[in-house]
Amino acid sequence: MGAVVGTLTMQTKQRRPSRDKADDELEMTMVCHRPEGLDQLEAQTNFTKQELQILYRGFKNECPSGVVNEDTFKHIYAQFFPHGDASMYAHYLFNAFDTTNNGSIKFKDFVMGLSILLRGTLQEKLEWTFHLYDINRDGYINREEMTEIVRAIYDMMGKYTYPALKGDVPQQHVDAFFQKMDKNKDGVVTMDEFIIACQEDETMMRSMQLFENVM
């Protein structure tokens, strides 16, 4: 996701002339799906008002209507992983940002999630990652859900990144995770189990941080 944000801000600098604060405030009130006011977003996130203005310009460059649908999100995300297939991971990531489950991401949805991923506490980042893996949103991660996410990550990275990758590697990764996370062996991982396991195991934490880098 850092790459996506970098591109949004770069395109903003390339395509937009310098503007003053009044122009930014005016545009944010005119967009079709206008976001929350800058002051409110600043209070709800870990971004400054100036950073929000930059993010908003980049967001609107890619999504002039003020919202992004899943197809557009996949198209943007695929550009950063040309050697693999990012479609499934982008699908799961889109759903994690689409907190209202209405099939679109507004600017507020985008910056709220981004704020956690880039500047949230460890607890907040782990909670967000748990929700990413909890595909059906039932409050638990089962083995099938974790397998789908991990396999999507390997597919996205592609054989260029993993030239010797074997087909059973994602499953082995999931088996190792579940053995450490599923403390009571009931076949599912709760948020508490997930967070505690990550905090207690440096190897697992590094793995989660690696996955975070592709968000």
Image (spheres, rainbow, N blue to C red):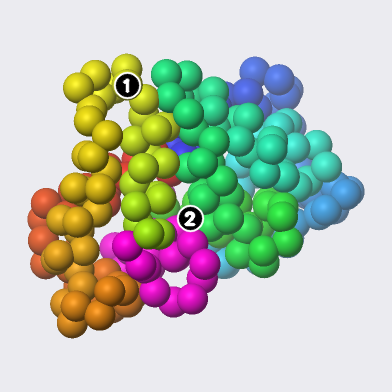
- Mark 2 or mark 1, which is nearer the start of the sequence? 2
Tag 1's secondary structure? helix
Q: Where is residue 71 in the image (x, y as percent from the top left)?
A: 69, 38
State left or right for residue 34 relative to residue 77: right
Neighbour tally class for label 1: few under 14, some 14-19, many 20 plus, Cα within 10 Å? some
Tag 2's secondary structure? helix
Q: Out of 108 and 162, give the one closest to the viewer.
A: 162
- Say which residue label 1 marks: 159
The residue drawn where x is 25% and y is 48% is 171
Q: Position of residue 37 (x, y in %)?
A: 73, 60
Three-letter amino acid code of the residue under disc 1: Lys
Place residue 178 in its image quadrant.
Answer: bottom left
Place residue 214 in its image quadrant.
Answer: top left
Residue 106 visible to the viewer? no
The residue drawn where x is 72% and y is 24% is 16
Q: Position of residue 121 (x, y in %)?
A: 33, 64
Magenta range: 118-143
Residue 115 image label: 2
Image quarter hosting the C terminus: top left
The residue drawn where x is 73% and y is 31% is 61
Three-letter amino acid code of the residue under disc 2: Ser
- Decide: marks 1, 2 in contact (CB < 8 A)? no
Q: Does the magenta stretch include residue 191?
A: no
Residue 204 image label: none
Q: Out of 100 and 63, give the one closest to the viewer.
A: 100
Q: Position of residue 166 (x, y in %)?
A: 22, 30
User: Rounded to the nearest whole Å, what is the CA distance between mark 1 and mark 2?
Assistant: 31 Å
